[in-house]
Image (spheres, rainbow, N blue to C red):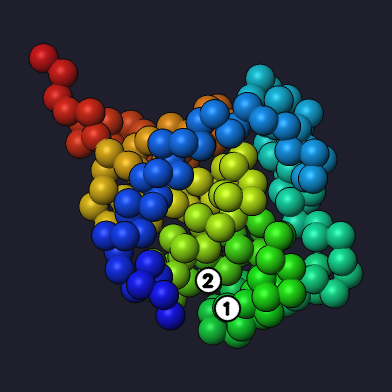
Amino acid sequence: MSAVSTNPKLIVAAIAAIVTFSLPLQAQDNPAEGISDLLQQLEQADPADAKRIDRQIKLEWGNSGSPAMDLLLKRGREAMERGDLQTAADHLTALTDHAPDFAEGWHQRASAWFRLGRYGLALSDLERALTLNPNHYEALFGMAVILEQLDRPELAYRAYALVQQIYPHYDEAEKALKRLETRAQGQKL
Protein backbone atom coordinates (compact mmCIF):
# COMPACT_ATOMS: atom_id res chain seq x y z
CA MET A 1 0.00 0.00 0.00
CA SER A 2 1.43 3.40 -0.91
CA ALA A 3 1.92 6.27 1.53
CA VAL A 4 -0.67 8.31 -0.37
CA SER A 5 -3.41 5.76 0.23
CA THR A 6 -2.69 5.66 3.97
CA ASN A 7 -1.95 9.31 4.74
CA PRO A 8 -5.08 11.49 4.65
CA LYS A 9 -3.03 14.72 4.70
CA LEU A 10 -1.22 13.75 1.50
CA ILE A 11 -4.49 12.72 -0.08
CA VAL A 12 -6.17 16.00 0.80
CA ALA A 13 -3.20 17.88 -0.68
CA ALA A 14 -3.48 15.86 -3.89
CA ILE A 15 -7.23 16.40 -4.02
CA ALA A 16 -6.74 20.13 -3.50
CA ALA A 17 -4.51 20.17 -6.57
CA ILE A 18 -7.09 18.28 -8.60
CA VAL A 19 -9.92 20.57 -7.54
CA THR A 20 -7.75 23.63 -8.20
CA PHE A 21 -6.58 22.57 -11.64
CA SER A 22 -9.65 20.72 -12.93
CA LEU A 23 -11.49 23.88 -14.00
CA PRO A 24 -9.42 24.36 -17.18
CA LEU A 25 -9.72 20.67 -17.98
CA GLN A 26 -13.49 20.80 -17.95
CA ALA A 27 -13.57 22.89 -21.08
CA GLN A 28 -11.75 20.21 -23.05
CA ASP A 29 -13.59 17.78 -25.24
CA ASN A 30 -13.37 14.18 -24.16
CA PRO A 31 -13.68 12.27 -27.43
CA ALA A 32 -12.78 8.95 -25.81
CA GLU A 33 -16.01 9.20 -23.84
CA GLY A 34 -18.02 10.44 -26.81
CA ILE A 35 -20.16 12.66 -24.62
CA SER A 36 -18.88 16.21 -25.02
CA ASP A 37 -22.14 17.25 -26.72
CA LEU A 38 -24.17 15.72 -23.90
CA LEU A 39 -22.09 17.59 -21.33
CA GLN A 40 -22.70 20.87 -23.15
CA GLN A 41 -26.43 20.11 -23.26
CA LEU A 42 -26.39 19.22 -19.57
CA GLU A 43 -24.84 22.55 -18.68
CA GLN A 44 -27.67 24.45 -20.42
CA ALA A 45 -30.63 22.12 -19.89
CA ASP A 46 -33.74 22.79 -17.88
CA PRO A 47 -34.21 20.50 -14.83
CA ALA A 48 -36.36 17.89 -16.60
CA ASP A 49 -34.05 17.61 -19.61
CA ALA A 50 -31.03 17.60 -17.31
CA LYS A 51 -32.21 14.38 -15.63
CA ARG A 52 -32.63 12.70 -19.02
CA ILE A 53 -29.21 13.87 -20.20
CA ASP A 54 -27.67 12.78 -16.90
CA ARG A 55 -29.01 9.24 -17.47
CA GLN A 56 -27.55 9.22 -21.00
CA ILE A 57 -24.15 10.37 -19.74
CA LYS A 58 -24.11 7.71 -17.03
CA LEU A 59 -24.96 5.05 -19.61
CA GLU A 60 -22.03 6.22 -21.74
CA TRP A 61 -19.68 6.31 -18.75
CA GLY A 62 -20.78 2.78 -17.80
CA ASN A 63 -19.83 1.34 -21.20
CA SER A 64 -16.22 0.18 -21.19
CA GLY A 65 -16.27 -1.16 -24.73
CA SER A 66 -15.56 -4.68 -23.48
CA PRO A 67 -18.32 -7.14 -22.58
CA ALA A 68 -16.05 -8.79 -19.99
CA MET A 69 -15.27 -5.46 -18.30
CA ASP A 70 -18.93 -4.43 -18.42
CA LEU A 71 -19.75 -7.72 -16.66
CA LEU A 72 -17.24 -6.96 -13.89
CA LEU A 73 -18.79 -3.50 -13.48
CA LYS A 74 -22.28 -5.02 -13.35
CA ARG A 75 -21.20 -7.60 -10.76
CA GLY A 76 -19.54 -4.92 -8.66
CA ARG A 77 -22.65 -2.74 -8.72
CA GLU A 78 -24.91 -5.68 -7.90
CA ALA A 79 -22.71 -6.65 -4.96
CA MET A 80 -22.91 -3.06 -3.66
CA GLU A 81 -26.69 -3.10 -4.00
CA ARG A 82 -26.77 -6.31 -1.92
CA GLY A 83 -24.52 -4.68 0.67
CA ASP A 84 -21.70 -7.13 -0.04
CA LEU A 85 -19.11 -4.38 -0.16
CA GLN A 86 -15.95 -6.49 -0.03
CA THR A 87 -17.15 -8.60 -2.97
CA ALA A 88 -17.99 -5.37 -4.80
CA ALA A 89 -14.49 -4.06 -4.13
CA ASP A 90 -13.02 -7.35 -5.35
CA HIS A 91 -14.96 -7.26 -8.64
CA LEU A 92 -14.13 -3.60 -9.15
CA THR A 93 -10.47 -4.20 -8.35
CA ALA A 94 -10.41 -6.83 -11.08
CA LEU A 95 -12.01 -4.26 -13.38
CA THR A 96 -9.47 -1.54 -12.59
CA ASP A 97 -6.62 -4.05 -12.96
CA HIS A 98 -7.80 -5.15 -16.41
CA ALA A 99 -9.16 -1.80 -17.64
CA PRO A 100 -7.02 0.87 -15.94
CA ASP A 101 -8.18 3.57 -18.39
CA PHE A 102 -11.88 3.05 -17.62
CA ALA A 103 -12.81 5.95 -15.31
CA GLU A 104 -16.12 4.47 -14.20
CA GLY A 105 -14.37 1.42 -12.77
CA TRP A 106 -12.32 3.67 -10.51
CA HIS A 107 -15.38 5.71 -9.57
CA GLN A 108 -17.40 2.65 -8.63
CA ARG A 109 -14.56 1.13 -6.63
CA ALA A 110 -14.24 4.46 -4.78
CA SER A 111 -17.91 4.10 -3.85
CA ALA A 112 -17.24 0.65 -2.41
CA TRP A 113 -14.21 1.90 -0.45
CA PHE A 114 -16.24 4.85 0.86
CA ARG A 115 -19.01 2.58 2.07
CA LEU A 116 -16.37 0.40 3.74
CA GLY A 117 -15.09 3.51 5.57
CA ARG A 118 -11.76 3.48 3.72
CA TYR A 119 -11.69 7.13 2.74
CA GLY A 120 -8.02 7.20 1.72
CA LEU A 121 -8.53 4.44 -0.82
CA ALA A 122 -11.73 6.10 -2.02
CA LEU A 123 -9.97 9.43 -2.55
CA SER A 124 -7.13 7.74 -4.38
CA ASP A 125 -9.58 6.05 -6.76
CA LEU A 126 -11.52 9.27 -7.27
CA GLU A 127 -8.26 11.02 -8.14
CA ARG A 128 -7.62 8.37 -10.81
CA ALA A 129 -11.19 8.63 -12.15
CA LEU A 130 -10.87 12.41 -12.45
CA THR A 131 -7.48 12.15 -14.10
CA LEU A 132 -9.09 9.95 -16.74
CA ASN A 133 -12.31 11.97 -16.98
CA PRO A 134 -12.15 15.51 -15.50
CA ASN A 135 -15.85 15.99 -16.31
CA HIS A 136 -16.98 13.08 -14.14
CA TYR A 137 -19.27 15.08 -11.91
CA GLU A 138 -20.24 12.00 -9.90
CA ALA A 139 -16.58 11.44 -8.97
CA LEU A 140 -16.25 15.14 -8.09
CA PHE A 141 -19.35 14.86 -5.93
CA GLY A 142 -17.93 11.80 -4.18
CA MET A 143 -14.71 13.68 -3.57
CA ALA A 144 -16.65 16.60 -2.10
CA VAL A 145 -18.58 14.29 0.23
CA ILE A 146 -15.35 12.74 1.53
CA LEU A 147 -13.66 16.13 1.92
CA GLU A 148 -16.67 17.25 3.94
CA GLN A 149 -16.37 14.09 6.08
CA LEU A 150 -12.68 14.92 6.65
CA ASP A 151 -13.73 18.40 7.86
CA ARG A 152 -12.29 20.23 4.86
CA PRO A 153 -15.24 22.54 4.14
CA GLU A 154 -13.35 24.91 1.82
CA LEU A 155 -12.15 22.10 -0.44
CA ALA A 156 -15.51 20.36 -0.29
CA TYR A 157 -17.24 23.60 -1.25
CA ARG A 158 -14.94 24.05 -4.25
CA ALA A 159 -15.56 20.48 -5.39
CA TYR A 160 -19.35 20.90 -5.06
CA ALA A 161 -19.08 24.15 -7.03
CA LEU A 162 -17.26 22.30 -9.82
CA VAL A 163 -20.05 19.71 -9.86
CA GLN A 164 -22.59 22.48 -10.27
CA GLN A 165 -20.59 24.12 -13.01
CA ILE A 166 -20.77 20.91 -15.05
CA TYR A 167 -24.30 19.92 -13.96
CA PRO A 168 -26.14 23.07 -12.75
CA HIS A 169 -29.28 21.14 -11.70
CA TYR A 170 -27.46 18.61 -9.49
CA ASP A 171 -29.75 19.03 -6.48
CA GLU A 172 -27.50 17.43 -3.86
CA ALA A 173 -24.58 19.66 -4.87
CA GLU A 174 -26.78 22.74 -4.58
CA LYS A 175 -27.93 21.69 -1.10
CA ALA A 176 -24.34 21.03 -0.05
CA LEU A 177 -23.21 24.44 -1.31
CA LYS A 178 -25.90 26.14 0.75
CA ARG A 179 -25.03 24.02 3.79
CA LEU A 180 -21.29 24.78 3.55
CA GLU A 181 -21.41 28.41 2.40
CA THR A 182 -20.79 29.97 5.80
CA ARG A 183 -18.13 27.46 6.85
CA ALA A 184 -16.30 27.68 3.53
CA GLN A 185 -16.57 31.38 2.77
CA GLY A 186 -17.16 32.92 6.18
CA GLN A 187 -19.98 35.03 7.52
CA LYS A 188 -21.02 38.03 5.41
CA LEU A 189 -21.47 41.28 7.27
What residue is shown at x 72% (from left), y 32% (from top)?
29
On screen, 65 above or below 95? above
On screen, 177 above or below 79? above
Query: Which of the labelled discs sits on residue 89, or is there none?
Result: 1
**How far is mark 1 from mark 2, CA to CA?**
6 Å
What type is the residue that disc 1 sits on?
A: Ala
Comparing 68 with 8, the one in front is 8
What type is the residue that disc 2 sits on?
A: Ala
> Which percent across, then down, holds residue 90?
61, 83
Residue projecting furthest to the left: 189
What quarter of the picture does the N terminus occupy?
bottom left
Look at the image and tell me whether residue 48 can be seen.
no
Q: Do the numbered discs 1 and 2 sit on residues whose CB atoms are within 8 Å?
A: yes
Give the left or right position of residue 66, taking residue 55 as reference. Answer: right
Query: Which of the labelled discs sits on residue 112, or is there none?
Result: 2
Give the left or right position of residue 173, taking residue 36 as reference. Answer: left
